[in-house]
Every structure is written in C-alpha cells, then in structure tokens.
Image (cartoon, coloured by chain):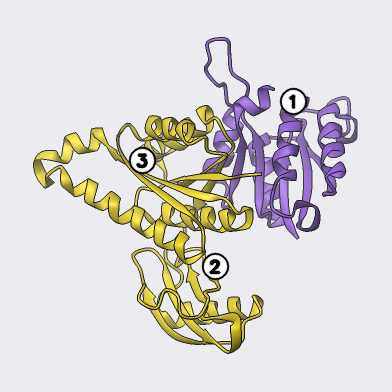
Chain colours: A yellow, B purple
Amino acid sequence: MYDRILVPTDGSEGSAHAAMRAVDLAGQYGASIHALYVVDESVRGLLGGLTGSGRLTEQGRHALDQVAALADASGVEAVTELREGDPADSILDYAEEVDADLLVAGTHGRSGVERRLVGSVAERLVRHAPCPVLTVRLPESDVTVEDAGDAERLAADALADAGFDADIVGTRRQTHLWVVEAESEGDAGDPLVYVDPVTQQTSVVPRPTGRYKNG
Amino acid sequence: MYEVILGIDDSERRAIAQAETVADLPNAAETVHATLFHDFTENPTGASVHQMASVRRAKEHLEEAGVAVSLQESSGDPAQEILALAEERDADLVCLAGRKRTPAGKAVFGSVTQEVILNANRPVLVCSPSEAED
C-alpha cells in the first residue's frame, strides 16, 4: 500500500491533472501528498536576465499552493517543497529523501523536439525512480469544458453518482480546474466538485458543514 | 469495474512485480479486473499465452489476492498491440514493468515502455526497476 505519494508539478495543465489523480489516490489509500516544484536551473539561467530570478520561484509557490489547496479540500495531508536544479534529478532525490511509495507524473502528448525534451523527464523518472511511477497523459484535445455551465452539468452528474442531493451554488475557474460549490441537506455537508477542463474528470469532495467557509 | 491491462513479457520477476502492484490498488479484490497480455511479436510455433510461465505466475498472484483475471495474446508490434487493446477495452490503467538494471546501474528500459507512456491516452503505471529486480 502507499503512504507517501510524490507529485511533481510544473504548474501546467498536465501537472494539475496529475495532481488531481494523486490527491484522489491519496484519499483512497489514506496516504499523504508530497508536492514538489523544481525551478529548472537551465531555464532560470536563460530567463534570469529577462524576468528576474524570482519569477519562477513565485510561479512554483503558486503551483504548490494549488496542489495543497486541492489536497486540503479532500482532507489529504500535503507537504510542499520547492527546489532548484535539474528537474528529473531533483525529483528522484526528493523521492528517495521522503521514501515515496508512488510517483505520479504528468506527461504531455507533444511531438517532435518538444516531445523529446519533455519525454526525457518522464523517461528518466521511470528509469531511475525507487518506486512505481504512474504517468498521466494529458490528452491531445484542448479544453472541452468551455464554460461554467458545462462544468456545472458535469458536476451535477458527479454529485448524483456520489449520492448527494445537492444544489449547485457557485462555480469558479481556477487556473487549470473548475471548482463547483454545492449545498446539500442534512449532515452530508456542502460538497465541492473539481472538474478537469480537458479530460472532464470530476472529483467530488465532501466537506463537513462550517469548515472552509473562508477558504 | 476498473479495467487494468498488464503488459507482460517473459520475465517471471517482472510479471510478479506487476501483479503485486496491481493487487495493491485500492479495493483491488472488489473493483479491479486485470487482463494479462502478452505479445509474441512473431509466433511461428503457435505458442499460447496460457503456457507462459510469467503470465501464469502473475495470474496466480492476482487470483490469490482475489482479483478477477483474464488472459489475452497477440502477435505484432508490442507497444501498438498494448495501445490497441487499451483502447478496445477502454482500460482505466496500463501496468508495465520497468526493466532490470545493467551491471553499470543503468536501467535498460524498453522502447516499448517509452512508446506506451508517450502514446497512451490513459494512465500508465510503471513498476520500479528495483522492485522488478527483487
């Protein structure tokens, strides 16, 4: 069984999708999430003079906060870590340090040179990771959930499947996810539904009433 | 059911590592259906997947864990055949084994694993090379 699930994030839609899977799995296993963002030293060297070196760090913190919020909403414990270095090496080092049981990594369905570059990180993780690696591919298709209405329809189906008798009260678009809030009668609380705008995957998060009101 | 396809080669150790990984999935006994798949590439002697020692070991392991199992075989390009089966079954997960390491410590992983990871429209779980080595 898995106790510690490592999910590297680069702030892209692909990694948001991977994070969602990771949090979902962590919930089922009762595992904790370790989210890692690596400031790529080579990219930093290239962009340093243009954008200032703090920019990528700031982006990384934001990406990590998003994963932490996703985990928190699911009642999953999350640890976040920001490092600088070569992405694959840093991820592998961190996996060893925290003794990760599973590594969940997003892969992009890219072609040509870009695919070689991106594929090489996933490839190196699979080659060298001390634990099983779950690769989650972001499908070629672009965003399919285009507006709040689409997100709410998917969320309503997911809520019904999960056995909630709930009314949707609000929908907002986060950078890479739709978040649909609902209210239900009784003790079931007010669930949140995360909707992946690309894959249409949904994740229903039951929330005890009263918590996260300001969250 | 949560449909998992295990692409199994002729290594018993790797097949067992895959079976253990799949048996560890949440509520595997109640929710997982595993298809054990072997591609013969060329199969002039007409061998059957049922005769493969690696497949049989994985099957035993999964059945002991209470996981429903079926077997499937093909002859052709391994990566393409796995991808085609995954589409056909609308699989939720494809499980592959990492290759063992060479004496130099470098993991030799097949082009098959790489091709499946990059082309599958679904999650791929790759057992760690170290696990497969035990």
Q: Are marks 1 and 3 in contact (CB under 8 Å)?
A: no
Task: Please report, as a chain letter, where disc 3 is located.
Answer: A
Disc 3 packing (10 Å; few <14; some 14–19; many ≥20): few
- Whether residue A56 is visible to the viewer of this picture, yes or no, is yes
- The one of B99 and B120 positioned closer to us in this rendering: B99
| Residue kind at label 3, given as amino acid type | Glu
- Vertical side of A12 occupied by A189: above or below: below
Identify residue type, mark 1. Arg
Which residue corresponds to mark 1?
B13
Residue A90's spot in the image, x, y percent?
Answer: 37, 33
Which residue in the structure is indicated by mark 2?
A203
The nearer-to-camera label among 2 and 3 is: 2
Q: Amino acid at mark 2?
A: Ser
Decide if residue A108 is in sight here. no
Marks 1/3: CA distance?
Answer: 35 Å
Q: Secondary structure at mark 1?
A: helix
> Which residue is found at the position 54% from the left and 66% from the top?
A201
Residue located beneath label 3 in the image: A114
Q: Residue at x 63, y 53 (%)?
A: A29
Frontmost residue, B109 versus A85: A85
